[in-house]
Image: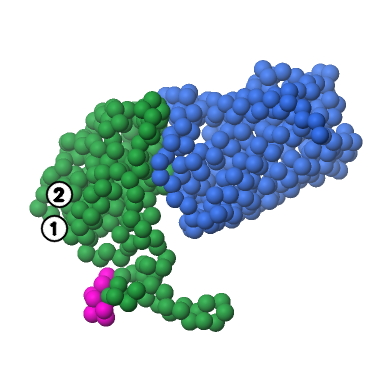
Amino acid sequence: MNIDFTKLFFTFLGLMIVLNWGLLMSAIMRKIGARVAGRYGIPWFQPWVDLIKNYAVRSQITHGIMFYLGPVFRLSGGVGLFLFMPILFGSNLWSNFSFQGDLILILYFQFFGMLGMALGAGEGGQPHSFIGISRGLSQFTTIEVPMTLAVISLAVQYHTLSISEIVAAQQGGIMNWTMFTNPFATAAAMLSLLGAFGHSPFDLVKAPNEIPIGPPTEYHGTFLGVLRTNAAILHVVETVLFMNLFFGGASNWFELIIKSFLIYFWSVFVGMVFPRFRIEQSVVWFLKVPLILGIIAILLL
Amino acid sequence: MTDEKLNNEQMESVSRFFAPENELKKVETPDGQIIEVNPLQDYFSEARPKVHEPNSSKIIEKFLNWARAESLWVLGFGTGCGSIEIPPLLTPRFDAFRYGVQMRPTPRQSNVIIISGYLAVKTLKRVVRSYEQMQNPKYVIALGSCTINGGMYFDSYNTINRLDHYIPVDVYIAGCMPRPEALLAGFGKLKELIKDGKAENANKYVENFDWYKANQKKIIKDWNMPDYNW
């Protein structure tokens, strides 16, 4: 078996870039949130300091094996998404380990971390975790429906399940982007993206002042550090997925940073404007507007 | 095991204070066996806390202490009138986020607890539980004169006078009430202490565990929890 060390090196480098960009992006978004509230906000390096602080906590307690494995599953979900995601279009080195049909695998990996986290947080035994998990899983199930419809619509439109080929089909000008060739699928997916990121109208999973941050209530120290590392990676990788599917991909890192920032900013922008939904409102909302848009996207093909 | 068990009379005197779910009870197992459960011994860990030494490498410990000082996660726990000083601290006027001070809703993830003002006996029990659930490098800020000598509640039947008899305190902020500026100055002082490696009170609590427990039990009459709340 041949191991392509150059590719491994570039994948690892890409992971580091994605991690640091994710941390920086979260700091920028929190600063934007602070400015909206009329505050100055955190220093830009705060996420790194928080991460070091969390990894440096001296004493840690555990509630069992699944409690350990929860963050590990979550991290492998995030890193797995990254590994099979073509990051830059037209570059063999930065396309990671993407292959024909990687779109299906990526849809699966989105749920993987969530389930691991549910098992781990469940073993923590904190009642708030259970509330958070039941909310999170029911909300994510309804997010998946319009999202999957949009993806199926794309697969039919481009006759492929490979992300690289979907990006390739969108090259040659802004009017070739899925955003313009299939607006209903884009709208359905962008609305379900709001739920996937869990910013304000749909932040009832973590709901900081209501159920003390939900599933990770019991997680501390290194456990929390792993979860936060994963959150940084996951945010970038999810935006890269949407960038690849709907906004023509990126051919260099600069383009990737601009596009992923704007896609992430979309969810933050909505979060700044709207207050939190209750779980029954959010589930019903996802089954109304995005689902109808997704069905239209299928019917119009 | 038998000699460790309390006799009936002792058991009765203890169980007067117990919440109903903490009393001795009989439980049926899935295979039909009836077993006796003592929740305090069987559901909770009775192990004593351990001292966690700082990293042996001075440079690494200095770096980690810098990170700890710049990322103070405060437990959202207000005890007395001082808790009204916390919201202005986080809103535009004073904006403590600039200094790395953030609120956390759960004791597991926070490393600073602010005892904001007088501490009622009933609240002391919750403070002890919350403090013990925080993980090792943990710091206590005592806000207001009430935590130093009882303040205007010095002769109250229902508040404690000196906070550091019950949990170790890193920084006192005097005043009645100290304004948010004073609290920001207190955070600055705490940061200095952490960066100098002098804020090791979590270990001090463990080293003098019996003394603290004796003091706490003198005040809290209805002690229906394990000695250390893991």
Give the colour in which the image draws chain B. green
Q: Position of residue B94 (x, y in %)?
A: 33, 28
The chain that hosts pointer 2 is B
What residue type is disc 1 on?
Answer: Tyr
Chain that the image shows in blue: A
Residue B157, labelled with which disc?
1
Q: Quadrant of residue A80?
A: top right
Residue B105 falls left or right of residue A301: left
Packing grade of label 1 (10 A; few <14, some 14-19, many >=20) is few
**Magenta region:** B7-17
Q: Is residue A281 above or below residue A21?
A: below
Residue A46 falls left or right of residue B205: right
Q: Residue at x 90, y 36 (%)?
A: A159
Q: How far apart are the two marked residues, 1 and 2, measured between alpha carbons?
A: 10 Å
The chain that hosts pointer 1 is B
Q: Nearer the viewer, residue A74 or A148?
A: A74
Residue B161, labelled with which disc?
2
Q: Main secondary structure of the magenta part?
A: helix
Mark 1: secondary structure:
loop
Q: Residue at x 18, y 49 (%)?
A: B165
**Which of the image's four quarters has the C terminus of chain A?**
top right
What residue type is disc 2 on?
Answer: Asn
Q: Position of residue A8 (x, y in %)?
A: 71, 28
